[in-house]
Image (cartoon, grey):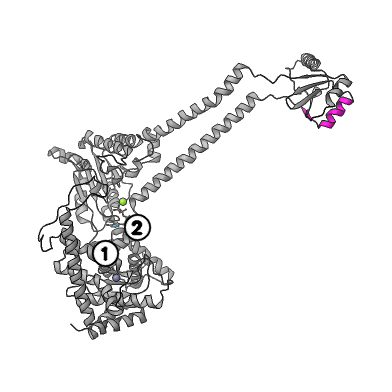
Amino acid sequence: MENNDNLLMADDSTKKHKQDPGIHTTGKNNNDNRKKFTYSAWSFLIALLLVFIINYLLFTPHIQYANVDYSTFKSLINDGTIVQVAFDGDQYIGYSVTKSNAVDMLSEIARSRQIPLSLDTTAIVPYQTYMIDDPSFVPLLDEKGVEYYATEPPKPSVLASLISMLFPIIIFIVFYAWMSKKITGQAQGVMSFNQNKSQLVAEGETGIRFSDVAGEDEAKAELEEVVDFLKRPEKYTEMGAHIPKGVLLVGPPGTGKTLLAKAVAGEAGVPFFRMSGADFVEMFVGVGAARVRDLFKQAKEKSPCIIFIDEIDAIGRQRSSANIGGNDEREQTLNQLLVEMDGFDSRTGVIILAATNRPEILDPALLRPGRFDRQVLVDKPDLAGREAILRIHTKGMKLDESVDLRKIAQASAGLAGADLANIANEAALIAVREHHSSISQTDFENAIEKSIAGLERKSRVLDEKERTRVAYHETGHALTAFLTPGSSPVSKISIVPRGYGALGYTLQYPTEDRFLLSENELLGSVDVLLGGRAAEEVTFSDISTGASNDISRASDTVRQMITEYGMSERYRNMTLPKTKSGIEGVSGGKEYSEKTQEYIDNETSRLINERYNAVKANLEKNKEALEHIAQELLKKEVLEGDEFEALAKQYTVK
Ligand code: ADP
Ligand code: ZN
Ligand code: MG
């Protein structure tokens, strides 16, 4: 029972199904490692196979025998063919001429034909069979006068045994050296560096210009200066100005930070080294630092150029003082980055861009002068920005004349550029799915709804009692909004279940973008959030779990009003300082002193109670309206803003 009391809040829900860029790159990294693993596993197998083959070729004797079964062997003895038998382990070898004769004979033949001596000659192939526990065998040999003896188990020469022992070890040493050369080669070799890790995009090849980035005018203005540094460094150095070394792009996910960095390279027409922070964090200690070193070395050779470190938070995270769960590898990499940034002169024409959506976790050392001393905010776009972004992303699309991008922009407050690009694409997909000849405004509206509230899930069936409760709950939100002066108008109420556990929702579109909220407006938004549960209590004299999200948001708002906005009675006009106790990054450290925390809790509970009772009384008074609208909603499932307003006007009493 989500109440999107304005679309700014839809932010949360879109984040949920947006891929976290951090996670994404980590995943990619794992994949790399996996590849490396299978790769090394293969080489390992091949090496092992090689050992076996060579061992076999070198150390297994290659004498051909004629394999016969035991009875044949015995009959060969009986008919006098076999004249000599060697007991060799578990087998008998029978010679048709005595062994010494055979060798003599062979030598004779070899000499007369002038060929090298070979024991493999078929003429005297010995017979071979496996032993059977047969007490009559030796008597038979005695009887037939066959010469017999046991062979000494073959004693390989010392040299051979030494080689056979050392051989696998040698193979492994060679293999290991080769592997480790490969790994360090990846870290330090120029060739493999380009191939594997950083994408070196040649001049202007990003193909992206500032005109591809809509909105973000301030960020663009700052970055245009960077482009100018790169194009005409002498203009600045002559004037004695310091060219910034590092520019940090800061902003929520999907606002176009990566896009802007590419646009800078595209505009400046200089080489662009792009790496993701996660690329530096490897399983081998020291590799990350080596990569940083190499990256800077290459960049200096190619200057003027841009180094872009995307998602720098993967390496730039605050170094832990206590080293609990510390990551030595990451810290080494970060230290190397700091060293490199200090070690070069921006007059060399290398500018480092980095992007992050979590500037608060960056190590302060990174932000010191001479490092990323310039920060460019890439914020979520405003109304005009959103319209411009939509224009860019609908450029190649077939839109019909009903499409009003301004309206779509109005309805998508709080969404980032990536979300808007996604909406445009989604609208096109919907149009195709519904066999429209072009994309209509309705397709866009559906796309927005889909991206805000998750996929429409008509298939999910609520039982009648649940549906009724949801209908009254949502009507409670809407009616409270209607009755609260200054609250944004309700544009839609729905009890069609959606993804992410939302059973119904009430949408309020703000008429304009809001960056400032007054105390009364904040309280009004709390009222609207509480309206759902209050309506349930008024109607069913019982409340449900469906409001848990509403009340947690209401309490958050009130707590913020007390701690951050200075809107409480006792701490009017002051923020409450957080204590710095506990180890940073480890939960359990108290945020406020005990007394302050107690006050915050009491005041929050008092205020919420006060608001809730007022909202409940108001709904009580307007029970007729609540009843009518909820029943209408149950019938139609969705009420548009004007339908709702007409009913509300008809039945409410002020
Ligand atoms: P970030 O790096 O800030 O997370 P990206 O630069 O990766 O965001 O943006 C993702 C995509 O969203 C871009 O490729 C682009 O299609 C779209 N986009 C985001 N912001 C804008 C913008 N201001 N103008 C045009 N397109 C944008
Ligand atoms: Zn609700
Ligand atoms: Mg990015």
Question: Is residue 343 found left or right of 143 in the rendered image?
Answer: left
- Residue ID for mark 1: 552
Please tell me whether residue 236 belongs to the stretch shown in magenta: no
- Residue ID for mark 2: 18
Amino acid type of the residue that numbered disc 2 sits on in the rendered structure = Lys
Question: Is residue 7 found left or right of 168 in the rendered image?
Answer: left
x%, y% of residue 611?
Answer: 19, 71
63 above or below 405? above
Q: Earlier in the sequence, mark 1 or mark 2?
A: 2
Question: Is residue 167 found left or right of 201 in the rendered image?
Answer: right
**Picture quadrant of residue 447:** bottom left
Magenta stretch: give its range: 62-82
269 above or below 602? above
Amino acid type of the residue that numbered disc 1 sits on in the rendered structure = Ser
x%, y% of residue 372?
Answer: 21, 43
203 above or below 10? above
Q: Residue at x 73, y 17 (%)?
A: 117
x%, y% of residue 56?
Answer: 63, 28
Q: Residue at x 52, y 34 (%)?
A: 44
124 above or below 609? above
x%, y% of residue 100?
Answer: 79, 15
**Residues packed near mark 2 inside 10 Å, few (<14), some (14 to 19) or many (20 plus):** few
